[in-house]
């Protein structure tokens, strides 16, 4: 089963935040967002607006398009891994 886009985006944000060694609080402060909202985003429970996407990307030192491209790569990775597991099971 593939993950939904909000979950993959949240995972991407979390990975990038952790890459910087930041807490959710630090990312929230840098992006001018509420810490609990950052947590909801990372868990895939919230879908960011374009303005929020821009705030997150800039806080993480990236462009919005790069952050979305990373999410797409993660989605493709999960799809490929799922196909491999299906092939092994057959």
Image (cartoon, helix red, strand yellow):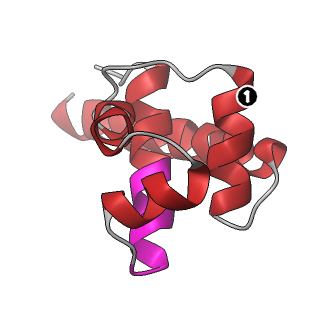
Residue 78 lies in quadrant: top left
Q: Locate residue 60, reporting x and y percent.
A: 63, 63
Q: Tell me what residue is drawn at x 73 percent, y 24 percent.
A: 50
Q: Main secondary structure of the magenta part?
A: helix
In the rendered view, tell whether residue 21 sits above or below residue 17.
Answer: below
Q: Is residue 23 left or right of residue 48?
A: left
* Quadrant in the rendering for residue 54: top right
Which stretch is magenta? Answer: 13-21
Q: Position of residue 20 (x, y in %)?
A: 49, 79
Residue that numbered label 1 is attached to: 51
Give above or below for 70 relative to 54. Answer: below
Could you tell whether 51 is left or right of 30 in the image?
right
Whether 10 is drawn above or below 57: the answer is above
Mark 1 crowd level (few <14, some 14–19, many ≥20, 10 Å Cα): few
Q: Is residue 35 magenta?
A: no
For the residue pair 67 and 76, the one nearer the viewer reads as 67
Q: Position of residue 43 (x, y in %)?
A: 27, 34
User: Which residue occupies the foreground of this view, 84 or 60?
Assistant: 60
Which residue does the image show at 24% across and 41% down from the upper left?
Answer: 88
């Amino acid at each position: 089963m593939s993950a939904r886009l909000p979950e993959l985006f949240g995972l991407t944000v979390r990975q990038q935040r952790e890459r910087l060694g930041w807490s959710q609080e630090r990312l929230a402060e840098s992006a001018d967002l509420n810490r609990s909202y950052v947590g909801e985003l990372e868990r895939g429970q919230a879908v960011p607006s374009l303005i929020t996407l821009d705030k997150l990307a800039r806080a993480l030192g990236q462009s919005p398009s790069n952050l979305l491209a990373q999410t797409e790569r993660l989605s493709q990775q999960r799809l490929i891994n799922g196909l491999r597991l299906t092939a092994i099971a057959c």
